Image: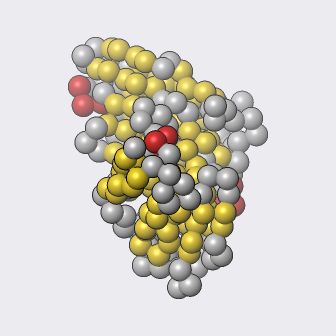
Amino acid sequence: DAKTTQPNSMESNEEEPVHLPCNHSTISGTDYIHWYRQLPSQGPEYVIHGLTSNVNNRMASLAIAEDRKSSTLILHRATLRDAAVYYCILRDVFGDRDDKIIFGKGTRLHILP
Amino acid sequence: DSGVTQTPKHLITATGQRVTLRCSPRSGDLSVYWYQQSLDQGLQFLIQYYNGEERAKGNILERFSAQQFPDLHSELNLSSLELGDSALYFCASSVGPGAIGAEAFFGQGTRLTVV
C-alpha cells in the first residue's frame, strides 16, 4: 500500500488559514492524492483530490508539490466546525493495483476560538 | 446526508452471537467498502465489493463475511462475536473502483456493542 505521513495533531485559531501537510515520497505516477475528514461521531467525508495541479473547491484547496512527493490541504478560514481528523490518502487512478482506500492515523485538527 | 444508508444505527448483543449489518449505497454507485473503527485501531479497511463481486480484502477476520446483492446493497455478517468486536462499522460507496470513481461517500455507521 502506498504510504502517507501526517503530523498527529495541529492547532489553529478560528478564522485563520490552516495548512495541513502530507508527505507521500513513494507516490506512483498513477496515484491520486485524496483528502478526507472525519468530524466527531460521524463517518468520514470527502474533502478534495488532485493528481498534479493545485485544486480548489468550496471546502478547501489542495497544493501539490512539483515532484508530487508532498501536498498541503489548505482551509482558508477555519471555523470551529472544521475541527476533525484529516486523512491524506493515495488512490490508484484505475484501482487495479490497490483500491482499498487505506486510512492512516491522520491529523487531528484543533480549532481555538 | 451522504446518501449511504446503514442499518441499524445501534446494536447491542451478547458474546457468541451473530449479527448482520446492512448498507444501501448511493443510487448509481457500484462499489461498496466496509470499515471497522475502534478507539485504539482507527479506521480499518475490511472488504470491498464492486458490482456484486469481491474486489479487495483487508484484515477481515474469518468470523466476518460480507456480500453484495444484485440490487447493490451489501451486508456484513459478524459471527461468534467477542467483546473486542465492539466498534463502529462504516460502509462507503463510490461510483467505481479507483480514483476514476473519485470520492467515496460514507454512511453514519452502525455502533456495535458486544456485552
Farthest-out residue, bottom: A67
Residue B106's x, y, as percent? Answer: 56, 39
Q: Is residue B99 above or below residue B87?
A: below
Farthest-out residue, right: B28
Q: Is residue A91 above or below residue B68?
A: below
Question: Residue at 65% of width from left, 75% of height from top?
Answer: A53
Viewer-closest of A20 and B67: A20
Residue B89's x, y, as percent? Answer: 43, 33
Image quadrant in which the C terminus of chain A is located: top left
Left or right placement of residue A58 versus residue A89 in this view: right
Q: Is residue A67 above or below residue A70?
A: below
Question: Residue at 28% of width from left, 14% of height from top?
Answer: B14
Viewer-closest of A12 and B35: A12
Q: Is residue B63 visible?
A: yes
Left or right placement of residue A82 versus residue B50 in this view: left
Residue B85, located in which quarter of the rendered image?
top left
Residue B61's x, y, as percent? Answer: 34, 40
